[in-house]
Image (tube, grey):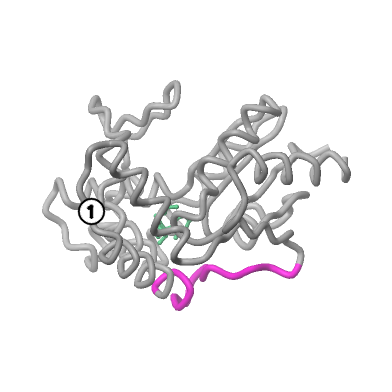
Amino acid sequence: QPVPVIAIDGPSASGKGTVAARVAAELGWHYLDSGALYRLVALAAIGEDVSFDDETEVEALARELPVRFEHARILLGDEDVTDRIREEDCSIGASRVAVLPSVRAALFDRQRDFRRAPGLVAEGRDMGSVVFVDAAYKFFLTASVEARAQRRHKQLMDKGIAATLHDLRNDLQSRDERDAARVVAPLRQLADAVLVETTSMTVEEAVSFVLENVRARQ
Ligand code: C5P
């Protein structure tokens, strides 16, 4: 029996990170935040003064990435970058480096290594379409741009980071466009994925929906 995978894909700030982490915790399964890897590559590029368009250099950074996931903290080398990679420059940088095919290839095996017993909940843009095509459970989690901008706004305010709703909405829209338009692994709702429209759902409701759907099919 292959190790079971729940793949949760969807656009930026759709709440898939929170939902996926909660589902993993409920089931006692491993959790992969694949977006964090792209954010880490962007942060490494910023730190090394490498342009996001320089495919050769960015690929080298992706291959060498000294990352460790420890107790819900993310370390790059010895530095705790858990909060740093959520900042806007890393969000934008992540979606820029994510269009580079060799960067995606460099992160492919690293992502597959997370698949360990008893199971994995993986979230991102191409979990169900590329990295874990054979996942038994695939979900597409989304919400309106307005709802997503408001959620991101609240998250940032809670952390004391200033941002306007207007800027966040524009940034989400341009990242969505870049993620959907790229040639390699574009964001798509797959025919075999279950749609979870969360605009008027709470986190608890979305988590229950996913868990019930998985249990009904187990
Ligand atoms: O999910 P998150 O917003 O952290 O992802 C940051 C960026 O990384 C996305 O905008 C997307 O461009 C890229 N990404 C991707 N494939 C994934 C996960 C994230 O291309 N599986």
The residue at 45%/54% (across/down) is 13
The residue at 84%/39% (across/down) is 215
Classify the position of ligand 1 by quadrant: top left, top right, bottom left or bottom right: bottom left
Q: Residue furthest left?
A: 49
Q: Which residue is mark 1?
A: 163
Q: Main secondary structure of the magenta part?
A: loop
Vertical placement of residue 97 versus 25, above or below = below
Q: Say whether residue 84 is magenta.
A: no
Q: Amino acid at mark 1?
A: Ala
Q: Nearer the viewer, residue 187 or 168?
A: 168
Disc 1 C-beta below 8 A from ligand 1? no
Q: Quadrant of the N terminus?
A: top right
| Residue 172 pos. (x, y %) | 37, 65
The residue at 27%/49% (across/down) is 61
Q: Nearer the viewer, residue 161 or 110?
A: 161
- Secondary structure under tag 1 reads loop
| Residue 2 pos. (x, y %) | 78, 39
Which contiguous range is marked in magenta? Answer: 178-191
Q: Say whether residue 186 is magenta.
A: yes
| Residue 202 pos. (x, y %) | 59, 45
Vertical placement of residue 24 versus 143, above or below = above
Q: Quadrant of the C terminus?
A: top right
